[in-house]
Image (cartoon, rainbow, N blue to C red):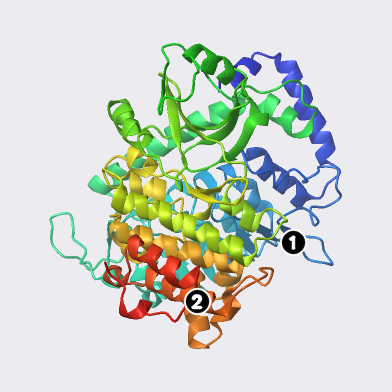
Amino acid sequence: MGIYLMKCKWPWLLNILFIFILTNRIRAISPDGEALLSFRIAIVSSDGVLSQWRPEDPDPCKWKGVACDSKTKRVTTLSLTNHKLSGPVSPDLGKLEHLRLLILHNNNFYGSIPSELGNCTELQGIYLQGNYLSGLIPSELGNLSSLQNLDISSNSLSGSIPPSIGKLDKLITCNVSNNFLVGPIPSQGVFGNYTASSFVGNRGLCGKQINITCKDDHGGATTNSKSPTSAENQGGKKKYSGRLLISASGTMGALLLVALMCFWGCFLYKKFGKHEGNTLAMDVSGGASIFMFHGDLPYSSKDIIKKLETLNEEHIIGTGGFGTVYKLAMDDGNVFALKRIVKINEGFDRFFERELEILGSIKHRYLVNLRGYYNSPTSKLLIYDFLAGGSLDEALHERSEQLDWEARLNIIMGAAKGLAYLHHDCSPRIIHRDIKSSNILLDSNLEARVSDFGLAKLLEDEESHITTIVAGTFGYLAPEYMVSGRATEKTDVYSFGVLVLEILSGKRPTDASFIEKGLNIVGWLNFLMIENRQREIVDPNCVGMQAESLNALLSVAIQCVSSSPEDRPTMHRVVQVLESEVMTPCPSDFYDSNSD
């Protein structure tokens, strides 16, 4: 932010010039292209997926993630999932009059859902789950008479469920689970068709769909289907609460708007003009302290701070739910990964050093090593070993090289051993809470290491595990965790089972092909099992598959993703079976012995 504030001191004339240049470049493109460029401008960070969106193109139909009608060239689909997109969702998407599918799930979008989406009357599917969206659900979504699928689960949405959505008679699926919604669930219209799974994880909701009786202001039961906090029916005490919520959201929106306007000129220049120097990524301030674990890194605080001051955008190697990750190279050739923590809760400093000392004391072959940390009034930076192979998510879904059967089995084995160590052998025992492919890192030999263990616990307050973890890992979560928000070793086991299926199939847990069928990767496995087609789960690009190993591995995965926590094995048992029956195939007795 420091560099943005500095660049805001440029003459306003230069900023106006940038906007003028951009405006003239946009004129060459279609109106739908202009709307998508506005969407791009609002994006603060990503994995680079939007780099080929060029203003000079006549239309956006060849842009990554965009599909158009072949005759009219009007945009019909915007699909950008799992691309680490961070920023608000631009209201200009409401100008895409012929948009049918909006698929932006599993990113880092924040801010509100634009009410302008209600203008896209041809929309058939909206998929915004697994982001950080907040504020109210727009009642304008009730204008989308063609809408068939709406999934806004696993965000931080608040307020009530708009009754207007119940009028959408074509709406087949509606998922608002794992948010902070309150009040009665509307019973009119299509809302009578949905089960509890559409609403779980919202502790303030009530209604017959979830078997929770609604109370009136005096504590008595009420059958009123409209929420007293809804935008359409607010009054009295509830209305005042709603104003507080809107006021808070408005304050955050105003702060965001100020920040965006401040670096508007330099942001446009960066996006559409030439680069002029590097953008400083770190705010390394005074009053800092640096702590190093394990005693084998002979660097002074001065040496490390000197290197931190040189970091810029070119050193970014990833982003995630906890912050940006940088590559830090020291003068002696040692390379580290530096994770900048941006979600710092009130009272964080009180526990920061104590908890990190515990995490820094943990050393294991299959865990990413925490080397130290930097603590200042403005920045919290964690220093890890750098792994040249990147993340498993990148290896499976982004890079061109293919993982063969042996490599996939070794990765599964390493992840299992790392997680088993956290559950059973380290003191204190650690529940990871966020097992997913992006938290499995690979060295140059494709050996797996579990990363980010302990961070979920370190950064949570009383309720942050819902916003930080659930929102970030949709598709990996155990059913009971989505209902209660309480993590256990068995919720980690479930996530590990999903990870195994992801490694086998090469598909993300919420792949678009599953969503079209109303499934996730676990539902897909169950379908294949019923059809006796379970071998079809294996990635067709995976060579060297062994049938006996696959059968044993599927047995492990099926047990891990059981809907009942009691039926899932411990990670110690998982490791035992992987070693005895998957790595060295033999007839499996896993179904008869699944507990320690």
Query: Looking at the rendering, which quadrant does residue 125 occupy?
Result: bottom right
Could you say which is closer to the camera, residue 178 or residue 290?
Answer: 290
Q: Amino acid at mark 2?
A: Leu
Q: Which residue is mark 1?
A: 67
Q: Which residue is mark 2?
A: 525
Q: Quadrant of the C terminus?
A: bottom left
Depicted 590 relative to depicted 435: above or below: below
State the separation of the CA atoms marked 1 and 2: 29 Å
**Residue at (66, 68) in percent of width and height:** 542
Secondary structure beneath label 1: strand
Query: Looking at the rendering, which quadrant does residue 160 occupy?
Result: bottom left
**Residue at (56, 71) in percent of width and height:** 514
Residue 399 pos. (x, y %): 69, 53
Is residue 246 something one can see in this rendering? yes
Could you say which is closer to the camera, residue 451 or residue 226?
Answer: 451
**Residue at (46, 45) in percent of width and height:** 451
Could you say which is closer to the camera, residue 57 or residue 545?
Answer: 545
Q: Earlier in the sequence, mark 1 or mark 2?
A: 1
Depicted 218 relative to depicted 390: above or below: below
Q: Quadrant of the N terminus?
A: top right
Which tag is nearer the camera, tag 1 or tag 2? 2
Q: Amino acid at mark 1?
A: Ala
The local crowd at label 1, few if under 14, some if 14 to 19, many if 20 or more residues have their Cα within 10 Å, is some
Position of 141 with respect to 51 (left or right) is left
Depicted 197 relative to depicted 119: above or below: below
Position of 460 with respect to 165 (left or right) is left
Residue 328 pos. (x, y %): 59, 27
Residue 486 pos. (x, y %): 28, 55
Could you say which is closer to the camera, residue 145 or residue 518?
Answer: 518
